Image: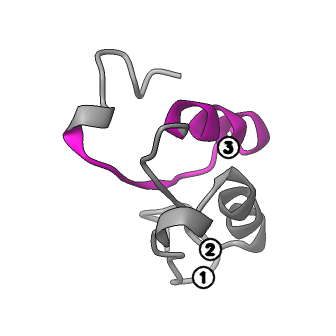
Amino acid sequence: MSLFNSRYPIICTPMNFVSDARLAIACNRAGIVPSLVGNDKITEQLEEFRDSCPKGNIILACTPSKLTPGFLNL
């Protein structure tokens, strides 16, 4: 799956409160596409994912109110 830079055509879909940076990092390392759910700690979760997987892609599920100017430029 060259579109997502993944070994397998598998996406770990957002699972509300269990989708965190640790799960996203494990999914990325396993070769599948990870996801995160936008909650109050989404900025910290994305920073942790980017620190561990700087070239990893991720699917982000959140409401527009969680996105602020510069949000995705971590």
Residue density around tag 3, few if under 14, some if 14–19, many if 20 or more, within 10 Å: many
Q: Are marks 2 and 1 in contact (CB under 8 Å)?
A: yes
Of the numbered discs 2 and 1, the one sitting upstream in the chain is 1
* Label 2 element class: loop
Rendered image: mark on residue 62:
none
Q: Residue 72: percent from the left, percent from the top?
A: 41, 28
Left or right placement of residue 8 versus residue 62 in this view: right
Please indicate, yes or no, whether residue 54 appears anywhere in the rendered image.
yes
The Cα atoms of the two marked residues, 1 and 3, are separated by 19 Å
Q: Residue 26: percent from the left, percent from the top?
A: 77, 65
Find the residue positioned furthest to the top: 69
Which residue type carries mark 1? Tyr
Left or right placement of residue 32 versus residue 22 in this view: left
Q: Residue at x 78, y 42 (%)?
A: 52
Q: Residue 61: percent from the left, percent from the top?
A: 36, 56
Nearest to the eye among marks 2 and 1: give it: 2
Nearest to the eye among marks 1 and 3: give it: 3
The Cα atoms of the two marked residues, 2 and 1, are separated by 6 Å
Q: Provide the residue designation for mark 1.
A: 8
Q: Provide the residue designation for mark 2.
A: 32
Q: Provide the residue designation for mark 3.
A: 49
Q: Residue at x 49, y 72 (%)?
A: 15
Please indicate, yes or no, whether residue 34 appears anywhere in the rendered image.
no
Residue density around tag 2, few if under 14, some if 14–19, many if 20 or more, within 10 Å: many
Residues shaded magenta: 42-64
* Label 3 element class: helix
19 lies above or below 32: above
